[in-house]
Image (cartoon, helix red, strand yellow):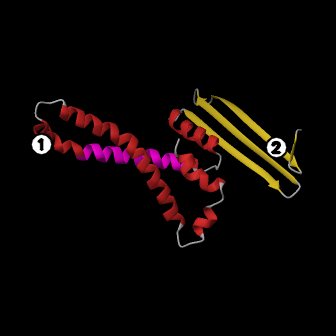
Amino acid sequence: VVAPDIVGRDQRNRSLTLYFSRAISRTDYALGKLAAMTTAMLAITLAPQVLLFAGNALGTQDFGGFVADEWTQIFPIVFTATIGSALIASIGVVVAAQTPQRAFATVGIIVAFVLPLSLRHAMAVNWYHSGFRDAELAFGENRLDLAYSVKLSSILAAGVTTRYLSRGTDLDGEEVLA
């Protein structure tokens, strides 16, 4: 749930042009955001494992003997936490980069991790935004489509689709209800 704040805030505040006005490449920007997200995930995934290792060491009669016997487990603990954090962070950053809207990005990330992935299931998420704004008139429309289907046999599939639509119009700073 951190990825929408890491990526979306720059899109919402339109600060990307400020970042790219200096000598920073798009790759450096994306890798920096991925590194920030990976670090946040690493704190979540590594801390419990280190706590368990330290708890096991403190639970023995000989702390130094336990660490001397089990020190080979430290590298696998750090390695698996790093790889897992990088994988989770990369999926979260990619999904969150698709929209500046925090709520849509959060739902997209949850859907990406919760829905099953197999040859018999398909899922689609489509978000569309359009609008304009000038001194007197503003109009905006957001549409979110969610679809899910299951392959029942070689020639038959069943699915469900839902759509959320929101529109807003402002005239001279006053919201106009349709």
Viewer-proximal residue among 36 and 83: 36
**Residue 84 painted magenta:** yes
Q: Which residue is mark 1?
A: 68
Residue that label 2 marks = 168
Query: x, y percentage for residue 98?
Result: 61, 50
10 Å neighbourhood of mark 1: few (<14), some, or many (≥20)? few
Numbered marks: total: 2
- Residue 132 sits above or below residue 54 on the image: below
**In the rendered structure, which segment of residues is drawn in magenta?**
75-94
- Whether residue 117 is visible here, answered yes or no, is no
Residue 173, position in %: x, y?
86, 49
Circle 2: residue type:
Gly
Residue at point 50%, 56% (across, down)? 33
The local secondary structure at tag 1 comes to: helix
| Left or right placement of residue 13 versus residue 63 in this view | right
> Where is residue 164, by image quadrant?
top right
From the image, which quarter does the C terminus lie in?
Answer: top right
Q: At label 1, which amino acid type do we have?
A: Ala
Q: Residue at x 19, y 33 (%)?
A: 58
Residue closest to the eye, 151 or 106: 106
